[in-house]
Image (spheres, helix red, strand yellow):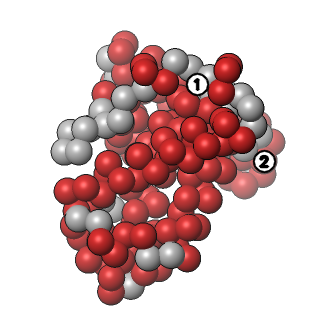
Amino acid sequence: MKKLTDEAILNLLRRDKSQGIRCLFDKYYVSLVVFGEQIVKDRNQSEDLVQEFFVRLWTHDYLDNVQATDLRSYLFRSIRNSSLSSLKKNDSLKEAVDLLDIQLPEDNNFSTNDRKVELALREIEKLPERTRKAIQLVMLERKKYQEVADEMEISVNTVKYLLKEGTKKLRDRLRDSEMELFLLFFRK
């Protein structure tokens, strides 16, 4: 399924909030989680922050006055602010990364990390169906091998084989610099 433009998503949000939020989530969730994780240094916490943010978008009309050209920056700035607030709240700011090193993506250009995530996700979509599903369940949804085996009705060894073959294909397709983020993003 082709991802909608920001303008199309905002128009859809105004017509059908449920569909619009779903499209917005599909397009930005992974990138926002990766971005938030750079700040809070915890994948689960970042996922929670992004999910809470989407709930706030659902319950409030924050996006009513946002222009399509500003949507991406608004989303990333909101996650940055939520992440920083969370650090302050947890008194973890002293242990956080040097915030000067964290750059917001530019309004109309993908950040380097965002491009790498998008590239990795596009390459995952090109994998054979069973391999893609195994990678998505283990690496994206963080399910255990046994859970994936049960869900896919295959053995744990088959899951491991599919992961091995899938990551091998992805390594072949992705350049070293993109692979660095890919491995960071999908670490267990």
Residue for point 33% across, 24% down:
173
Determine whether the residue tagged by mark 1 lies in a helix, strand or loop.
helix
The quadrant of the image that shows the N terminus is bottom left
Q: Which mark is residue 60?
A: none
The one of 16 and 169 positioned closer to us in this rendering: 16
Count the marks: how many?
A: 2
**Nearer to me, 172 or 130:** 172
Mark 2 belongs to which amino acid? Answer: Glu
Q: Residue 181, position in %: x, y? A: 45, 23
Residue 184, given in percent of the width and then of the height, sits at 54, 23
Q: Are marks 1 and 2 in contact (CB under 8 Å)?
A: no
Q: CA distance from mark 1 to mark 2?
A: 17 Å
Is 179 rendered above or below residue 42? above
> Circle 2 is placed at which residue position?
147
Q: Is residue 182 above or below residue 14?
A: above
Could you say whether the residue bearing mark 2 is in a helix, strand or loop?
A: helix
| Picture residue at 58% right of the left edge, 25% below the top | 164
To which quarter of the image does residue 95 belong?
top right
Q: Position of residue 31 (x, y in %)?
A: 44, 43
Q: Nearer the viewer, residue 123 or 108?
A: 108
- The residue beneath circle 1 is 164
Q: Amino acid at mark 1?
A: Lys
